[in-house]
Amino acid sequence: MFGLGTQELLIILVLVMIVFGAGKLPQVGGALGKGLRNFKKGMGEAGEDIEEADVTEIEKKNDKDEKKES
């Protein structure tokens, strides 16, 4: 996991608890989860848009080639 060991993860957890406090930790985790979910959703939609653009571009190229052959 990103080359982090147990000690590094514990240090990060302690720092997060100091900065945000134990009470806000669930809110921070929820916000982080929502952010990651939206990021993955956006990446998936971008991939679909790219695939659609590629297919459209290929179809246009094939149509031009067919017209040249006629």
Image (spheres, helix red, strand yellow):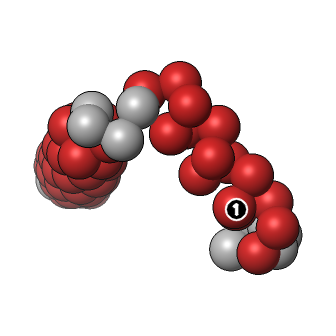
Q: In front here: 47 or 29?
A: 29
Give the quadrant of residue 15. top right
Q: Position of residue 30 (x, y in %)?
A: 20, 45
How many other residues sit within 10 Å of disc 1, few (<14), some (14-19) or many (≥20)?
A: few
Residue found at the very far top of the displayed protein? 19
Of 13 and 30, the residue lying toward us: 13
Query: Height in image: 23 above or below 63?
Result: above
23 or 57, nearer to the observer: 23
Tell me how many marks there are.
1
Quadrant placement of the N terminus? bottom right
x and y, in percent, of residue 57 in the image: 26, 43
Percent x, y of residue 3: 83, 70
Rendered position, 15 above or below 67: above
Residue shown at 59% from the left, 51% from the top: 13
Residue positioned 50% across, 39% down in the render? 17
Residue type marked 1: Leu
**Disc 1 secondary structure class:** helix
| Residue 18, visible in the rendered structure | yes
On the question of residue 53 being in view, the answer is no
Given residues 35 and 45, the one toward you in this image is 35
Find disc 1 in the rendering and name its residue: 9
Q: Is residue 6 left or right of residue 54?
A: right
> In the image, what residue occupies the spot 43% across and 27% down?
20
